Image (cartoon, rainbow, N blue to C red):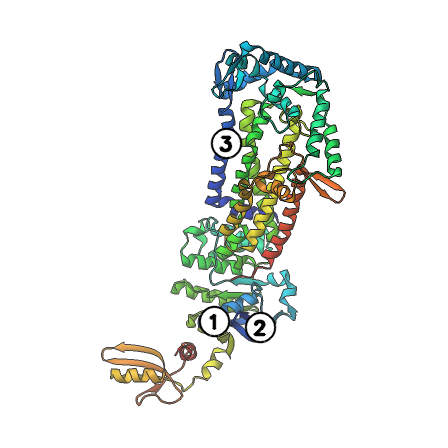
């Protein structure tokens, strides 16, 4: 199974949201990282065939997804970033409706809906109207609907938004167990979500793919470049902040603990520490904001 | 497909707003159509006035007295009797405007039960559409010895030969209407038909039902865009295919069900009081110059068919607008403008493109009185207004639905 994205571009009047994006996706979990406006959502929508690319092509197993039509959507599961529900539908009704849209038989849909309601911990609320649900409950229902057809390609746009830490852990486990022989693409701002479950990470910036690789491969670039130091003088803190990419500032009594990304040692007492994905993300995107 | 249609119907029926709109309009329609009964008046021979159901009973009895076949002789007798009464100075008074009129007692004893009949006969002799009996009062019966029904045909021909603001009927149209009129069976039979005529006085108010249904359906596609549910639906297997069909089918089931309820309440509330008498009578009792060979019952069936096609056309148009526009409110504004625009525009005659288009606008088209000779010429084919209404709205429905399906399937989320 392969999902090939070839020079995919989306242009809105004067703005290019996705710029000649190419990648070949094989089964695995792909974490899509990028700041707001990096083009993640547009890219996901084009993969889901609900936004028309300005140019470029997406092929599933060698065939254009436009031509595949229903056959492509059969293998697709999508959780959009912002989406609506039918407030007067119950959680169960909603899943049964989406199951019907996905062409799942009633018998199979009943089994699958019940199974997923249990997994996303909404079993007790199955007969409750969605309008009574909290944001997190709606998000969990959204995850359930995306997985109803046991999709071969699962696209999740900000799936952990609104979930509490316990639910996030549960979600990560769910994706890990689900992802075998499937292509899962998920975008998030919460780097730790990706860190735990993504096999490969794609970093997007201004519509371009700027990095791609396993977490280890990407972090290798930062080896020896992440520093930690304690600074007592406020003036020095300000000075360092203006020169270097500061990942974290932690104040404790008179001491300020800084985490810095820099090719050279930024401070006399700075020590090298092991990089993580948050360092990578912030190094790339804090830089762009400065 | 069945499951999808059920869910789409559930969406429509579970919206509180839709339920409120349907119920409010049902109450409004029932009130408007009941008012016909409540505001019906009759006066008996003693001058006692009645209102509502009692008045209907009184009028029924009064009509019984004059019912029968309207032969030429009978009509001439009626005119002569009217003139004799008028010529007797004991029967007339000069009213406050200085005009001569019958005394109250003459109205009560003679005119009350036959005024509608005489006003209708008067149309055959009047130069313009007359609403009273003045032409009959001055008609020279000796000079006008021609058969009443022949005179009627002549009057229809006269109308066909008239010049309306520089516009005239083509010879082909004239032939069409003459032939149509020749098919009416004469002499006409006269009996109680007030259930039908009073129903027709308010029938066009069913447009409220069409508006209510359009309000409910404005969100079928646009609501998905507005709520953001389109992002999920369009990525599912049947989201761009079967679901569009399911939405359309559900909308039509919904529209048919709701409109049928409105029709039952509207027609029921009139017939419940007036009864269904007169269904077998010719519609010419309402307008003697009507060229259509139809009974009241047939005209009602025809009008029901017209109402449904107008509804279906408007539903199609609403669904297309809903698929095209992002906001159900915009859909509604356009819908209501299309439906209500003709209320503010006057139709001057049966001729001219502008007038002919106005006749086909929803507010005018939902009810046909089968009295006007409005025809549409396409090469050698001539189509009358009721049939043209049906053809037009079926055409609108088909085109609008094809466009709606295409638009929604190709919709790009934002």
Left or right, B73 with respect to A142, comes to right
Pointer 1: what residue? A197
From mark 2 to mark 1, how far is it between C-alphas? 26 Å
Where does the image place residue B280, in percent across and percent down from the top left?
A: 66, 24
Residue B325: percent from left, percent from top: 54, 55
Mark 2 residue element: strand
Tell which subunit mark 1 falls on. A
Say which mark, if any, is on residue B309.
none
Q: Which residue is painted at 66% across and 13% down in the image?
A: B77
Considering only order in the chain, which callout, 1 or 2, is on the residue closer to the N terminus?
A: 2
State the separation of the CA atoms marked 1 and 3: 66 Å
Q: Which one is closest to the eye, mark 1 or mark 3?
A: 3
Chain to which mark 3 belongs? B
Give the residue displayed 42% in from the left and 66% down from the top: A169
Rendered view: B254 above or below A230: above
**Quadrant of residue A170 within the rendered picture:** bottom left
Tell me, yes or no, if residue B241 can be seen here. Answer: no
Given residues B310 and B232, the one toward you in this image is B310
Mark 3: which secondary structure?
A: helix
Q: Give the chain of mark 2.
A: A
């Amino acid at each position: 199974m392969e999902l090939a994205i070839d020079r995919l571009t989306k242009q809105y009047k004067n703005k290019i949201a996705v710029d000649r994006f190419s990648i070949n996706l094989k089964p695995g979990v792909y974490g899509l990282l990028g700041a707001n406006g990096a083009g993640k959502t547009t890219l996901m929508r084009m993969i889901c065939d609900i936004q028309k690319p300005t140019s470029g092509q997406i092929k599933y197993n060698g065939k254009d997804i436009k031509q595949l039509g229903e056959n492509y959507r059969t293998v697709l599961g999508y959780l959009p970033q912002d989406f609506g529900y039918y407030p007067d539908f119950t959680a169960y009704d909603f899943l049964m409706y989406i199951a019907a849209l996905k062409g799942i038989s009633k018998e199979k849909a009943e089994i699958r809906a019940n199974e997923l309601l249990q997994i996303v911990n909404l079993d007790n609320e199955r007969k409750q109207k969605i309008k009574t649900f909290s944001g997190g409950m709606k998000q969990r229902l959204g995850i359930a609907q995306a997985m109803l057809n046991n999709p071969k390609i699962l696209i999740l746009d900000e799936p952990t938004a609104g979930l509490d830490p316990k639910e996030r852990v549960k979600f990560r486990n769910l994706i890990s167990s689900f992802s075998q022989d499937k292509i899962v693409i998920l975008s998030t701002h919460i780097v730790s979500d990706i860190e735990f479950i993504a096999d490969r990470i794609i970093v997007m910036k201004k519509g371009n793919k700027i990095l791609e690789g396993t977490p280890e491969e990407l972090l290798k670039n930062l080896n020896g470049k992440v520093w930690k130091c304690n600074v007592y003088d406020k003036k020095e803190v300000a000075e360092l902040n203006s020169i270097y990419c500061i990942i974290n500032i932690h104040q404790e009594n008179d001491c300020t603990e800084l985490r810095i990304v820099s090719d050279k040692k930024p401070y006399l007492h700075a020590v090298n520490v092991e990089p993580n994905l948050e360092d990578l993300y912030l190094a790339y995107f804090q830089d762009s904001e400065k | 497909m069945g499951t999808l249609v059920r869910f789409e119907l559930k969406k429509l029926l579970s919206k509180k707003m839709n339920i409120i709109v349907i119920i409010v309009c049902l109450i409004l329609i029932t009130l408007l159509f009941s008012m016909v009964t409540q505001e019906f008046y009759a006066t008996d021979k003693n001058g006692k006035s009645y209102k509502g159901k009692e008045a209907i009973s009184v009028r029924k009895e009064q009509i019984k007295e004059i019912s029968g076949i309207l032969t030429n002789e009978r009509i001439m007798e009626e005119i002569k009797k009217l003139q004799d009464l008028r010529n007797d100075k004991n029967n007339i008074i000069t009213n406050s405007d200085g005009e001569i009129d019958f005394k109250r007692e003459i109205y009560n004893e003679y005119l009350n039960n036959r005024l509608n009949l005489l006003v209708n006969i008067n149309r055959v002799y009047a130069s313009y559409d007359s609403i009273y009996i003045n032409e009959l009062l001055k008609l020279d019966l000796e000079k006008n010895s021609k058969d009443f029904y022949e005179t009627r045909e002549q009057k229809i021909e006269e109308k066909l030969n008239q010049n309306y603001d520089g516009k005239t009927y083509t010879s082909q149209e004239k032939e069409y209407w003459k032939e149509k009129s020749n098919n009416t069976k004469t002499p006409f039979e006269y009996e109680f038909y007030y259930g039908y005529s009073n129903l027709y006085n308010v029938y066009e108010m069913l447009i409220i039902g069409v508006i209510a249904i359009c309000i409910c359906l404005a969100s079928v596609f646009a609501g998905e865009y507005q709520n953001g549910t389109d992002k999920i639906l369009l990525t599912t297997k049947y989201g761009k295919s079967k679901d569009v069909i399911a939405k359309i089918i559900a909308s039509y089931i919904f529209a048919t069900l709701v409109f049928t309820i409105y029709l039952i309440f509207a027609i029921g509330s009139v017939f419940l009081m007036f009864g269904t008498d007169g269904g077998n009578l010719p519609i010419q009792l309402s307008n003697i110059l009507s060229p259509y060979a139809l009974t009241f019952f047939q005209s009602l069936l025809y009008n029901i068919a017209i109402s449904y096609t107008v509804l279906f056309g408007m539903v199609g148009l609403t669904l297309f607008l809903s698929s095209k526009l992002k906001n159900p409110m915009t859909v509604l504004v356009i819908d209501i403008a299309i439906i209500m625009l003709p209320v503010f525009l006057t139709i001057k005659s049966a001729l001219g493109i502008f007038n002919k288009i106005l006749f086909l606008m929803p507010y005018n088209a939902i009810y046909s009185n089968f009295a006007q000779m409005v025809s549409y010429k396409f090469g050698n084919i001539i189509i009358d207004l009721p049939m043209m209404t049906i053809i037009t709205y079926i055409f609108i429905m088909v085109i609008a639905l094809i466009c709606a399906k295409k638009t929604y399937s190709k919709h790009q989320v934002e």
